């Protein structure tokens, strides 16, 4: 029956369901709205009536809903004739209790299929035994999973993934059966890493959410709903081996952005692909989403090749790409019970997700900020990757595990230099778990130099100096002190000198100025 339903959707539903909008496919009838706080039910019903629409679903925790126009044309109470999705979105945004309205956008995923010749991937470099700590739930948003996945298992690649929960958003049932192959490949890679040594390990569970169809296409509405459902079902890590190449326009992508914000607030790490266009996704006018979202709960993955250089297809970015993982000719299960080799940041993301889950099983508690820090700072720095990601290196399971198991709550600045052990930058960017930073008395009256790259605060951090006149953080050139969304920086007993002509403080989180603080 599932194949028949897919055929009916393809032949009947799609022609009137999608339309082209500046090169992007969008639904001709469904659209998102963001409510302005708590809105009375009778107000929502009145809006739906006036807009000739039906509510498909709503999430009050996030304040977003998916509505569907019942048909065109129609006339609103104000006499506006609505003939298409553009007009209904415009009229929705004019409602007093609706903050924003936007399109339901079609996304596509893809990778680069290869044969086995020249494959350099060795799973032993990334797997390890599961620990005795936290149980970890991985939610995979993709094309589903093949019932034949276990048949692809080899002597060293364990694809025996038979026990999982999930949902099929394409066919609206509880059987996320893959009819594309991408999701099966991704799920197999993750399982082969988490269960490479712990063959019967019970610490990692899988949640398969089919958000993309046989053609590898998925509506944003299904992706957003899957994210929110994964949160409600207590996922710890979400794997998104896909992205949308586009400009970062907050009003256009608010549903996806708010959903991921919600997962971050729930302590869920979203691991997503940087993309395969070979471009710098720090350029927000031509980035890849959600990798380009400024959210601390996102870990963005690029791909490296057999030479430990950035793969020719991989996107990159010193700010919006966090770490590189192997993404060249990676083996995984195919739909027929055999092996398929594929390249892409999709595969690199799957490797990173497997490593992240394994590291989590070795911790006493789950802290996604600490996990993200351990993965990034545990990377092996590679000269060829300098400036191409936050870590400037490749993922390393053992290093990440060591950092995650031994967080350092306190740190003392002993060097005034911009980087290196003992510097302020090292304490903030390279030391995981730090919540308080003190300045050593030996640096009395010596400015702490911050130059080159921005100094980014991505967790809750306290910096305590020796006094407003004796401890100084000096921002040189055009460097910025940046507090990320969801992060807090508390300063006391120091001054900040913006000595550079374009030096600045960018506060996207919570900057608290305690006692004896001066900013010049």
Image (cartoon, rainbow, N blue to C red):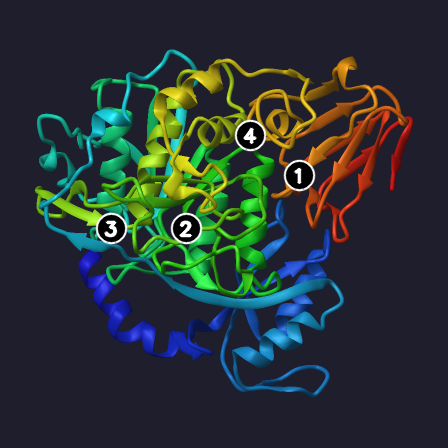
x%, y% of residue 490? 78, 29
**Residue sitting at x 15%, y 30%:** 157
Which residue does the image show at 28% across and 68% down from the upper left?
A: 9
Circle nearer the N terminus (2, 3): 3
Splitting the image into 4 quarters, where does residue 209 fall?
top left
Marks 2 and 1, how far apart at CA: 22 Å
Question: Mark on residue 288?
Answer: none
Instruction: Give the vertical position of 497 relative to 78 (above or below).
Output: above
The quarter in which the N terminus is drawn is bottom left
What residue would you read off at disc 2?
Answer: 274
Point 80% across, 44% down: residue: 498
Q: Secondary structure at mark 3?
A: helix
In the picture, measured across the screen, residue 127 lies left or right of residue 454, that is left
**Image vertical order of residue 482 relative to residue 67, above or below:** above
Task: Tell me which numbered mark, 1 or 4, is placed earlier along the sequence.
Answer: 4
According to the image, label 1 marks what residue?
486
- Residue 109, how many percent across, how many down? 32, 58
Residue 459, quarter of the rendered image: top right
Q: Are marks 1 and 3 in contact (CB under 8 Å)?
A: no
Q: Which residue is mark 4?
A: 369
Tag nearer the camera, 2 or 1: 2
Q: Position of residue 128 (x, y in %)?
A: 28, 19
> Is residue 167 among what the camera can see?
no
Q: Earlier in the sequence, mark 2 or mark 1?
A: 2
Image coordinates of residue 361 in percent, x first then y, are 39, 19
- What element does badge 2 sit on? loop
Label 1 crowding class (10 Å Cα cut-off): few <14, some 14-19, many 20+?
some
Q: Which residue carries the number 3 mark?
A: 182
Q: Nearer the viewer, residue 8 or 140?
A: 140
Q: Residue at x 70, y 26 (%)?
A: 416
């Amino acid at each position: 029956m599932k194949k028949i339903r897919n055929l009916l959707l393809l032949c009947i539903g799609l022609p009137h369901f999608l339309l082209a909008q500046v090169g992007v496919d969008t639904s001709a009838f469904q659209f998102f709205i963001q409510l302005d706080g708590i809105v009375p039910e009778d107000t929502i019903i009145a809006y739906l009536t006036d807009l000739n629409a039906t509510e498909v679903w709503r999430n009050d925790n996030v304040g977003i809903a998916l509505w569907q126009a019942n048909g065109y044309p129609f006339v609103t109470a104000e006499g506006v004739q609505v003939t298409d999705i553009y007009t209904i979105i415009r009229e929705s945004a004019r409602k007093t209790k609706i903050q924003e309205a936007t399109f339901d956008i079609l996304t596509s995923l893809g990778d680069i299929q290869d044969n086995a010749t020249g494959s350099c991937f060795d799973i032993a470099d990334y797997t390890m035994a599961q620990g005795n700590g936290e149980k970890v739930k991985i939610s995979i948003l993709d094309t589903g999973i093949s019932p034949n996945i276990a048949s692809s298992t080899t002597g060293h690649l364990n694809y025996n993934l038979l026990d999982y929960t999930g949902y099929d958003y394409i066919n609206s049932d509880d059987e996320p059966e893959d009819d594309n192959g991408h999701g099966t490949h991704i799920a197999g890679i993750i399982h082969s890493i988490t269960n490479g040594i712990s063959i019967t390990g019970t610490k990692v569970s899988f949640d398969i959410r089919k958000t993309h169809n046989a053609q590898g296409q998925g509506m944003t509405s299904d992706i957003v709903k899957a994210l929110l459902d994964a949160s409600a079902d207590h996922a710890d890590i979400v794997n998104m081996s896909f992205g949308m190449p586009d400009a970062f326009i907050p009003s256009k992508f608010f549903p996806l952005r708010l959903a991921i914000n919600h997962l971050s607030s729930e302590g869920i790490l979203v691991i997503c692909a940087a993309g395969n266009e070979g471009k710098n996704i720090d350029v927000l006018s031509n980035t890849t989403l959600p990798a380009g979202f400024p959210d601390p709960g996102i870990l963005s993955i690029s791909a490296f090749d057999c030479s430990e250089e950035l793969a020719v297809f991989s996107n990159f970015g010193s700010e919006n790409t966090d770490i590189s993982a192997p993404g060249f000719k990676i083996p995984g299960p195919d739909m027929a019970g055999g092996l398929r080799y594929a390249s892409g940041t999709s595969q690199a993301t799957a490797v990173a997700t497997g490593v992240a889950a394994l590291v989590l099983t070795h911790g006493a508690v789950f802290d996604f900020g600490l996990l993200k820090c351990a993965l990034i700072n545990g990377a092996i720095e590679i000269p060829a990757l300098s400036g191409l990601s936050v870590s400037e290196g490749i993922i390393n399971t053992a290093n990440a595990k060591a950092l995650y198991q031994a967080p350092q709550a306190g740190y003392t600045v002993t060097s005034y230099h911009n980087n290196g052990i003992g510097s302020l930058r090292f304490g903030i960017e390279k030391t995981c778990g730090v919540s308080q930073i003190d300045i050593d008395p030996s640096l009395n009256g010596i400015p702490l130099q911050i130059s080159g790259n921005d100094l980014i605060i991505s967790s809750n951090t306290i910096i305590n100096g020796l006094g407003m006149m004796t401890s100084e953080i000096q921002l040189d050139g055009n460097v910025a002190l940046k507090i990320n969304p969801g992060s807090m920086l508390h300063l006391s007993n120091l001054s900040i000198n913006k000595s550079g002509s374009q030096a600045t403080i960018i506060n996207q989180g919570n900057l608290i100025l305690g006692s004896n603080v001066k900013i010049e």
